[in-house]
Amino acid sequence: MAIEDKPSPDENGVASNYAPAADEKSIKTQVTDLVDDVRKLAEAELEYYRVKLSVNMAATKTVLLLFSVAIIIGATGLVALILGILLILTHYWGPVAATGLLTGSALLVTTVLLNMAIKRARKLPLDENDP
């Protein structure tokens, strides 16, 4: 003679005959699905940061290129100023206009390029909390 365990009554005193349905997923399947979802999330996060880094690197390269060109043109302007002063001191008034024009235009281009580089540098999303 076999002894059967009767279901224990719930808080209302009613015995429940709950048995898991056959179509419900087992714990092992649920854990496997969870691990797969976490893996997919991690891959998506890695791809997001990879793209974000490549965008930031492209913008950073542009800023560095602008700074480099500005420094080169600024140095050229200083050389032109020195040569112009030498020409002015040797010939007094002949090369004054040419020196002023060359130096002024070089410094103007330098100022414009530096301002462009500074504006782009301020727009770089370096902080994760910035939009």
Image (spheres, rainbow, N blue to C red):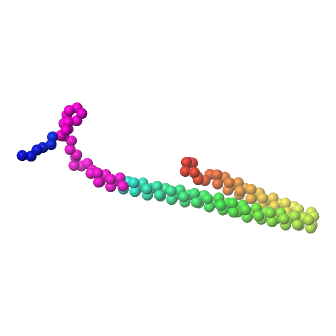
Please state the total of marks drawn on the protein image: 0
Evaluate whether residue 102 shows in this view.
no
Judged left or right of residue 123, residue 29 is left
Please tell me which residue is depicted at 72% across the width and 56% down the height of the picture: 112
Q: Position of residue 98 (x, y in %)?
A: 85, 63
Evaluate whether residue 22 shows in this view.
yes
Residue 66 versus residue 127 in the image, above or below: below
- Residue 24 versus residue 80: which sits nearer the camera? 24
Judged left or right of residue 71, residue 101 is right
Residue 131 versus residue 47 in the image, above or below: above
Q: Position of residue 70 (x, y in %)?
A: 72, 61
Q: Residue furthest top?
A: 12
- Main SS of the magenta segment? loop
Q: Quadrant of residue 89?
A: bottom right
Please tell me which residue is depicted at 12% across the width and 43% down the height of the picture: 4
Q: Residue furthest left?
A: 1
Q: Position of residue 34 (x, y in %)?
A: 35, 52
- Residue 91 versus residue 57: which sits nearer the camera? 57
Judged left or right of residue 93, residue 107 is left
Judged left or right of residue 9, residue 120 is right
Please tell me which residue is depicted at 73% across the width and 62% down the height of the picture: 71
Magenta span has 21?
Answer: yes
Q: Position of residue 103 (x, y in %)?
A: 81, 61
Q: Which residues are magenta?
A: 7-35
Please tell me which residue is depicted at 39% across the width and 54% down the height of the picture: 38
Magenta span has 131?
Answer: no
